[in-house]
């Protein structure tokens, strides 16, 4: 089975990171997704069944999961659904995995600050001959959308501003102008 799936839920375990013998970074965590519906007779929201998934990310995504996602946070995961079954001691077990393509915070439950990593994105590691930017190149001469300066991991070009973040909340601190 190789179906795409999008799941909203909560991170139910600590993030486990590792590297394969081939040198590929991995990160995984357990994801719980609880069905909720409004019970008109009780005039309240009621929890239903919880579906459990093991989410697995690789390469750049694994590194970003490891430094961004924490147990208890609400996330949205997009990836390929994998169903596994095995038998042990005469009993059949089932597991549901998601090979993640994207993982992000669910902004319905809070706010987040996005920081683009140098060389990140689907073009990372691919050469320019294939029609993609080389790692570390933005393809916009250091400018993002609407001509705003983008930090591409360079050597501190003039005009770049150091952003300060609150270590406890991860929010952008106010800068004195």
Image (cartoon, rainbow, N blue to C red):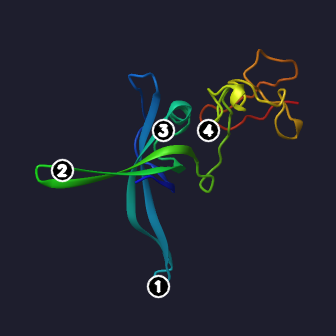
Mark 4 in CB contact with mark 2 (< 8 angstroms) = no
User: Element at badge 1?
Assistant: loop
Residue located 77% across and 14% down the image: 155
- Is tag 3's residue or tag 2's residue first in the polypeptide sequence? 3
Q: Which one is in front in this view, the residue at disc 2 or the one at disc 1?
A: 2
Residue tagged 4: 169
Position of 17 compared to 165: left or right?
left
Quarter of the image that includes the C terminus: top right
Residue tagged 1: 41
Mark 1 in CB contact with mark 3 (< 8 angstroms) = no
Residue tagged 2: 87
Residue tagged 3: 57
User: Element at badge 3?
Assistant: strand
Neighbourhood count class around disc 3 (C-alpha, 10 Å): few under 14, some 14–19, many 20 upward:
many
What whole-number distance in Å separates the C-alpha atoms at marks 3 and 4? 25 Å
Q: Which residue is nearer to you in this view: 98 or 30?
A: 98
């Amino acid at each position: 089975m190789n179906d795409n799936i999008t799941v909203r839920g909560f991170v139910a375990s600590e993030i486990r990171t590792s590297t394969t013998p081939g040198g590929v970074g991995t990160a995984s965590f357990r994801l719980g997704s609880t069905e909720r519906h409004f019970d008109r007779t009780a005039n309240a929201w009621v929890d239903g069944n919880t579906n459990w998934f093991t989410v697995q990310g690789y390469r750049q995504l694994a590194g970003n999961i490891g430094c961004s996602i924490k147990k208890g946070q609400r996330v949205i995961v997009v990836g390929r659904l994998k169903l596994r079954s095995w038998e042990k001691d005469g009993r059949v077990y089932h597991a549901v995995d998601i090979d993640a393509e994207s993982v992000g915070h669910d902004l319905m439950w809070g706010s987040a600050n996005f920081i683009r990593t140098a060389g990140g994105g689907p073009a990372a590691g691919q050469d320019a001959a294939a029609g993609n930017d080389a790692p570390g190149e933005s393809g916009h001469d250091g400018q993002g959308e609407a001509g705003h300066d983008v930090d591409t991991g360079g050597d501190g070009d003039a005009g770049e501003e150091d952003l300060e973040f609150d270590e406890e909340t991860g929010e952008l601190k106010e800068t004195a102008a």
